[in-house]
Amino acid sequence: MYAALCYLGISFLTLSSATIFLNLNVKVRQNKFLRFLSFYLLPFIFTMSEMLPRLTRGIKGEITVMLPVFIPFFISLTIAYYFFKNP
């Protein structure tokens, strides 16, 4: 169960990071707010949609399994955003 949850989380995070390619559009690349949203909006929505129902039901074991996937992903996303923002 936990392995399937991790694989599902990794696949959704991978798909949600595809919005980074929106930065190829000039309007998105030149607007700071749109650039920030293109990096963080979908991964953040996915993370919250996965974690909030588990927190309200009190299932802490699944969240403990998901955190080693989400935390490094957001750290690497932040590093990528920083390097993209400051070429």
Image (tube, rainbow, N blue to C red):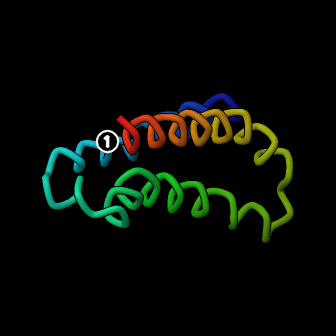
Residue 42: x %, y % from top left: 42, 57
**Looking at the picture, how far across and down is residue 55, in whole percent?**
79, 64
Q: Is residue 22 above or below residue 6?
A: below
- Image check: 8 left or right of 34? right
Crowding at mark 1 (Cα within 10 Å: few <14, some 14-19, many 20+): few
Please count the marks in the image: 1
Q: Which residue is mark 1?
A: 18
User: Which quadrant does the C terminus fall into?
Assistant: top left
Left or right, residue 63 beside residue 8:
right
- Residue drawn at x 45%, y 42% is 81
Judge from the rendering whether residue 48 lies leftward or rightward of residue 19; answer left or right: right
Which image quadrant for residue 34? Answer: bottom left
Q: Is residue 20 visible?
A: yes
Question: Going by the picture, which residue comes out furthest to the front?
Answer: 86
Left/right of residue 52 with respect to residue 44 in the rendered view? right
- In terms of depth relative to the viewer, which is nearer, 82 or 40? 82
Looking at the picture, which amino acid does disc 1 mark?
A: Ala
Q: Is residue 5 visible?
A: no
Q: Nearer the viewer, residue 79 or 43?
A: 79
